Amino acid sequence: MGGNSRKVSKEALPRGPADPALGGISLVFPVYNESFIIEQTLRNYIAEWAGRVADFEVIVAEDGSVDDTKSVLERLEKELPIKLYMSDERKGYQRAVIDAVAHATKPWVFVVDSDYQFAAIDFWRLEPLRRTHDIILGMKAPRRDPCYRVWLSWGYNLLLRWFFKLPYRDMDTGFRLIRKTALDQLAGQVRYMSFFTAEFVVRAHFAGFKITEVPVPHYQRKIGSTTIFFLSSLFLICFRQFVGLLKLRRELKTRGLLEAARRSPPPRPTN
C-alpha cells in the first residue's frame, strides 16, 4: 500500500568490491537527534565498506541536535575514520544536506539518512549502476513507516509525477548514490521543497542526468521516532511542499524546460 509494487530480489547479494575505475565514494550522513542509533549506523556502514570500497570517506554532518547526539559523535570521532562537522544551530533538512554534500571530495556521493532504516549491505544494489547512470535512487520496497507517512509519500510522489511528467516512484528516498558533478551543478539550486532529494531529482531530470531507481528493503525504526513528521505539523509541512511544487513548476515552465520535455521526453529509467 502507498506506492511500490516492485519486489526486492531474493537472490544472494554480491558484496563488492566496488569498481575502483569508477572512482571513490563519499559516504555522507546528515544527522539530527539520533543519539540512540547513530553509533550503530556508522559502525555498520564502515564495517561493510572496509576492504570492499578501496577509496572512501565518511562525512557526518550534525545539524544542531538538542539530544546527546553531539557528545556521541565527539566520542566516535576519536574511534572511527569519520570527518565530523557540527552546527550550533538547526538549519533544517534541506540546508543540512546541501551543506553536508559540499564537504564531499570523491567523484561519487552516497547520501544516507542516519536513522538506519536502510541496511548497509543494500549499498551493493546501487553500486554497479554507477557504470551507466549519474543518480541511483534506492526505492523503498515496501516502505516501513507509519501509515500516514506512507500515504503522504505516495501522494507527494504522485503530485511530482503529475506536475513534472516524471517516471520515478520514490523521489523522496533517503538512500541515494549521486555523481558529484550533478551535486556540484544542482545542489545549490534546491530551494523550494523542504527535504532536498525530490527537488534535486526533478532538477537533475531536466538537466539531462541519467537517473534510475533500484528497489531496496526498508525497515522500521529500531529506536526513537521521526524528528520531522510530527502529526501536529503535518498540515503546515504539506502546505509548504505544495507551494514548493508550484514554485518549482513555475520556474521550469518559465525557463521552457517543461515544454521542451513534452516535445522530446527522455527515456524511462531502467533497473
Image (tube, rainbow, N blue to C red):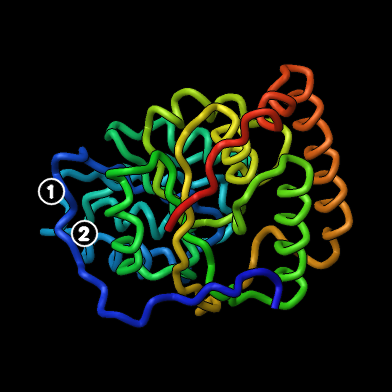
Q: Report x, y in % for residue 258.
A: 72, 28
Q: In this view, does 227 lie above or below 63?
A: below
Is 9 or 219 nearer to us in this picture? 9
| Left or right of residue 156: residue 198 | left
Which residue occupies 56% across, 56% down?
173
Viewer can see residue 222: yes
Please say if 109 is above or below 53. above
Mark 1 or mark 2, earlier in chain:
2
Q: Quadrant of the C terminus?
A: bottom left
Residue bearing mark 1: 54
- Type of the residue with mark 1: Ala
Q: In terms of secondary structure, where does tag 1 sit?
A: loop
Question: Looking at the picture, which amino acid does disc 2 mark?
Answer: Trp
Q: Position of residue 185 (x, y in %)?
A: 48, 23
Q: Quadrant of the N terminus?
A: bottom right
237, above or below 142, in the image: above
Are the residues tagged 1 and 2 within 8 Å (C-beta)? no
Badge 2 marks a residue whose secondary structure is helix
In the image, what residue occupies the spot 35% across and 67% down? 122
> Could you say which disc has been placed on residue 151 in the image?
none
The residue tagged 2 is 49
Side (left or right) of 186 relative to 202:
left
| Inter-mark Cα distance, 1 to 2 | 8 Å
CA neighbours of label 1 inside 10 A, class few (<14), some (14 to 19), many (20+): some
Residue 234 image-quadrant placement: bottom right
**In the rendered image, the vertical position of residue 88 relative to residue 119, given as above or below:** above
- Looking at the image, which is closer to me, 71 or 82? 82
Question: Does the rendering let one see residue 88?
Answer: no
